[in-house]
Image (cartoon, rainbow, N blue to C red):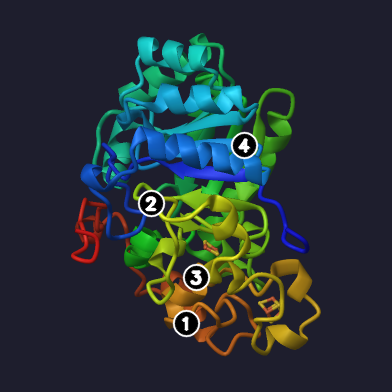
Amino acid sequence: MTGIPQPFGLLAEVTHQCPLHCVYCSNPVELFERSDELTTDDWLRAIRQAAELGVLQVHFSGGEPLVRGDLETLVAECRGLGLYTNLITSGLGLTERRAESLVSAGLNSAQLSIQGDTAESTNLVAASKRFDKKEAAARIIRDAGLPLNMNVVLHRVNLDRLDAIIDVCVSWGAERLELANTQYYGWALRNRELLLPSKTQLDEAVAVYERRKAELAERMELLWILPDYYEPYPKPCMGGWAQTALTVAPDGRVYPCPVAEEITTMEFASVRDHDLKWIWAESPAFQAFRGTDWMPDPCRSCSRKELDFGGCRCQAFALTGDAGRTDPVCIHSSDHHLVQDALDRANGGDGADPDTDREQLVYRRPTVSARRS
Ligand code: SF4
Ligand code: FES
């Protein structure tokens, strides 16, 4: 594959089924049913092809990957191929027995998500009161001998509780906590008016993060995923299009990132029909925005084009309908007003108030597209 980079990560979205209904979910708005999902043999073939392609890590995700009864078989295949495996889970459905069988199959680590620091805040964000299950899952993960990584998506509804959220993760024994400010795609874009924090709220949260990071340095690693709407330049999304990782969706279609399924103007190939090597190296969708030749102005003549690669293709599509435009987060983008207008509303007196406008939150629900069914 001369000149084509080698991917090191595979995100295996084994199902879209999920017991939670998070208002920020980055899964596509149109979800797959169980009957659309790849079979065990399809996944085993895809994993073998990923290893041949150079992938080193496989992250099992969804939806809730524990829904799949064949997860142990897939993990065992990865172990046989020398691949590192990580389970990205809501914790709901994780029992001692399941954790033990996954560890026996070779699972290397688990990342547990929380939505808040109480059952009430979890219910507001995810329409689920099972905070107790998450606490139990943290214990199960630790007792199974796995490192406990945790993740919380931050937004206007929970940013003011950051101190308490960090306390929860410390008390549950997390070794690493990813504080991921919401990225506005999929369901999160639908709920943007209620999720986008004010600048004041964000600055206060940054102060909390920096204080706790220093305080916990010996105990827990804290990571802060930037809220890109408040940055002058876009994030170097995925390290550039089709550079470092690939995502296989529940139905077998393959994407350069977990959100690209939302780009409805592009055709993405499936592992049901093609080898992963061809999809990665030669399929038109993976070639479309690889490198810098595709860039329009202002990126084409910008000194940052090798730093941020023109930003996020999914965000460009979500906001402008054209995945080939400069990410509107960029201050040089002619579409930047689309981001600035949202920020002005979040910081103005007439912005939505999550405490009084909660009924406006749109929860993730299993809608299935006519295209797929
Ligand atoms: Fe990045 Fe393009 Fe903006 Fe330059 S113009 S900072 S390359 S998005
Ligand atoms: Fe798809 Fe950024 S999320 S390129």
Question: CB atoms at circles 4 and 1 under 8 Å apart?
Answer: no
268 sits to left or right of 55? left
The residue singled out by tag 3 in the image is: 315
Whether residue 148 is visible here, answered yes or no, is: no
Query: Distance from label 4 to label 1 (Cα)?
Result: 31 Å
Q: Amino acid at mark 3?
A: Gln
Q: Amino acid at mark 4?
A: Gln
Q: Amino acid at mark 2?
A: Val
The residue singled out by tag 1 in the image is: 322
Question: CB atoms at circles 3 and 2 under 8 Å apart?
Answer: no
201 sits to left or right of 370? right
Q: Residue 223 at what x, y percent from top left? A: 64, 42
Query: Distance from label 4 to label 2 (Cα)?
Result: 33 Å
Whether residue 66 is visible here, answered yes or no, is: yes
Q: For the residue labelled by badge 2, is the local secondary structure a helix, a strand or a loop?
A: loop
Q: Residue at x 70, y 31 (%)?
A: 215
